[in-house]
Image (tube, rainbow, N blue to C red):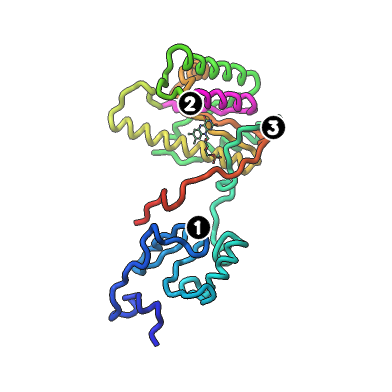
Amino acid sequence: MQRKKEFFLPEINADAPPPQPQFSLPDALCPCCGATSIPNGGDATAFICPHCFWEIDPFLHTEDEPSDQNHGITLRQARENYATFGISSEKYLQLPHAPQEIWRRRSIRRFSDSPVYPETLCEILRAGMAAPSSKNRQPWKFIVVSGGAKKEMLAAFQQGIEREKHSTPLLPESREHIAGAEHTLEIMRCAPITVFVTNPIGRSLFQSLTPEERIAEICNIQSIGAAMENMALAAEGLGLGSLWIGDIFFAYEELTRWLDTDGELMAAMAFGYPAEHPEKRPRKSLADTIEWR
Ligand SMILES: Cc1cc2nc3c(=O)[nH]c(=O)nc-3n(C[C@H](O)[C@H](O)[C@H](O)COP(=O)(O)O)c2cc1C
């Protein structure tokens, strides 16, 4: 007797009718975990769940039938596996995983008083410098602020926020975020260390750019982003917490003046030992974020 799956696979049975899609994306809800399944490529009309890896099997009639598509396991077993391991089949646990630091890292907004030793910080900075960069330009300089310098830096940040609020705002359309910047300032007060990153070959915020200059600037910004993420992950691996800080731009002029260095202020990240362990923050779904072609 012809196996039911072959009937739908023209490369196996040349006389079979062309495959008809069995599901459209919004309908392709995983019967194992309920997430939206995605086409798993190739010519077959197969949908796989990117969350638990259950492949939708249109030939299953009951949850106790072994599924060809799912290496012979039943939907009931898959659901039990999902409840136990978070994945439809135990064997998927052996699949390679991305480094755990990626999944464990959180933005940390409360730090303990424990000091960060220079050796530890240097390891984090080396991780930043190991990042890829466009044309290997390494468009970064790291300025480590701690101890007495921290007080001056915080004063410059505070001054910028006051100016934004009461005199000549640089970011008039971002008024609603000033309260957030004040909160960030308080977090930085508690963080033992803040690392500022400048781009020594960066273009001023106020400069108009040719398309080529803009592309170089975009690539340099991406390179600095890679360095920042490397530092955040290295910190996580070393047991430290980090907070990436974009609110520095409310005090762009004041901090630039205080840093008194070549190039453009690009980014800042606070580091310290965490005094909180936040839950994972929500992420958009794979279905809303990724387009599969
Ligand atoms: C470029 C950038 C700028 C950020 N600026 C700030 C900031 O100024 N203050 C703050 O509290 N968090 C800041 N964050 C942290 C984000 O709020 C945080 O990454 C996001 O809410 C997701 O949380 P998670 O990092 O714990 O996953 C920034 C993150 C990035 C990538």
User: Residue 234: which quarter of the image?
Assistant: top right
| Cα distance between the residues tagged 2 and 1 | 35 Å
Q: Residue at x 46, y 74 (%)?
A: 60
Q: Residue at x 43, y 39 (%)?
A: 133
Q: Which residue in the rendered view is the most extreme toward the top?
A: 167
Crowding near the residue tagged with mark 3, few <14, some 14–19, many ≥20 C-alpha atoms within 10 Å: some
Q: Position of residue 143 (x, y in %)?
A: 55, 26
| Cα distance between the residues tagged 3 and 2 | 26 Å
Q: In the image, is 248 to the left or to the right of 190?
A: left
Q: Please tell me the numbered disc located at residue 51.
A: 1
Q: In the image, is 217 to the left or to the right of 105?
A: left
Q: Which region shows up in magenta?
A: 178-201
Identify the element where label 2 is drawn.
Answer: helix
Which residue position holds label 2?
177
Of labels 3 and 2, the one closer to you: 2
Task: Tell me: residue 237, above or below residue 207.
Answer: below
Q: Residue at x 50, y 73 (%)?
A: 71
Determine if the magenta segment contains residue 194. yes
Q: Tell me the kind of residue under disc 2.
A: His
Mark 3 vs ligand 1: CB below 8 Å: no
Which is nearer the eye, 261 or 176? 176
Crowding near the residue tagged with mark 2, few <14, some 14–19, many ≥20 C-alpha atoms within 10 Å: few
| Cα distance between the residues tagged 3 and 1 | 36 Å
Tell me whether circle 2 and circle 1 mark residues in contact (CB < 8 Å). no
Determine if the magenta segment contains residue 271. no
Mark 2 vs ligand 1: CB below 8 Å: no
Which is nearer the eye, 219 or 273? 273
Q: Please tell me the numbered disc located at residue 112.
A: 3
Q: Tell me the kind of residue under disc 1.
A: His
Q: Tell me the kind of residue under disc 3.
A: Ser
Q: Residue at x 52, y 64 (%)?
A: 32
